[in-house]
Amino acid sequence: MAGLEAHYSARDIEARILAAVRAAGLNPDQRLSPEELGALDHFHTGGFRASLELLELAQIRAEDRVLDIGAGLAGAGRLLASMFGCRVDCLELSPDYCAGAVLLNRLTGLDDRIEVHEGSALDLPFPDDSFDAVWMQNVGMNIADKRKLYAEVYRVLKPDGRFAFQEMAAGETATSYFPLPWATDPADSFLISAEEMRSILGESGFIAELFEDTSDAHLSMTSANATPAATGQLSLAVFVDNLAQKAGNARRSLQEGQIRLVRGVFRVK
Ligand SMILES: C[S@@+](CC[C@H](N)C(=O)[O-])C[C@H]1O[C@@H](n2cnc3c(N)ncnc32)[C@H](O)[C@@H]1O
């Protein structure tokens, strides 16, 4: 993806992760916890806190098999696997992030419960009816074909399965501040409005259990200088260039209503 893409080889990513972990005073030779890594591996608006909130809303159970689409470094997968003991498959387009995810799974001792797959959200490498829950955070804004995306989510979910997500949506006016965390320029950004999202999800066979706009809550919870770049050695800046500028543009876009932050839990009809 354009804004948050990893610019490094798999080996570079591993070296950067290990250097950042050490610089943060953690010992990668001792088992790390998902919480300790939270500032590094939750690549989405609201970071670790937003994952904990979605976790509660999604009502994941120990027996669930979960798919995380666009998993990045698999931070959410480790949280799910460690808190509930469930089995998680992580699907990620970038081979570099896949390598980072595999490393962090090993460092947290969770590699027996999490499998990382390199692949596309538009062509999920899983049979129909495979998962009890699909999880997705800040991924759809890089995918133009939303109908195909939601059709794939629906296909791999079991009857009565849940789709839990958070996403950026288009606001009232066009996005004008670039680069954004997910897009260097407008050609990389594929936002749709919250209403359109709900409608396509409905047409894809989902019913909404929860669908809410959390933009204002997010803005009031985070101060203007609390960009991920400012949170110390373990931060998204390990992978993302110009992070402060991108995060600042995203905040300004949210404040001015050019973008909205939404989350939802939808169920297979
Ligand atoms: C903003 S990051 C979010 C990562 C992760 N969900 C998280 O919250 O930590 C978006 C991720 O989606 C991945 N991605 C973008 N398009 C994708 C696609 N078509 N299929 C699979 N992954 C994709 C990117 O490579 C990137 O890792």
Image (cartoon, rainbow, N blue to C red):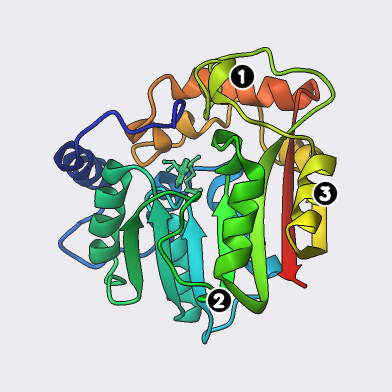
**Of the pair 18 and 100, the residue shown nearer to us:** 100
* Mark 3 / mark 2, whichever is N-terminal: 2
Please give the label number shown on residue 249.
Answer: 1
Which quarter shows the N terminus? top left
**Of the pair 268 and 262, the residue shown nearer to us:** 268
Give the amino acid at mark 2: Asp
Rendering quarter of residue 256? top right
**Residue to which mark 2 is pinned:** 129
Task: Evaluate if marks 1 and 3 touch, with contact meaning CB atoms under 8 Å apart.
Answer: no
At 47% across and 66% down in the image, what residue appears? 79
Please give the label number shown on residue 76.
Answer: none
Query: Is residue 74 something one can see in this rendering?
Result: no
Residue 142 picture location, percent across and down: 54, 35
Q: Is mark 1 within 8 Å of ligand 1?
A: no
**Residue to which mark 3 is pinned:** 199
157 sits to left or right of 242: right
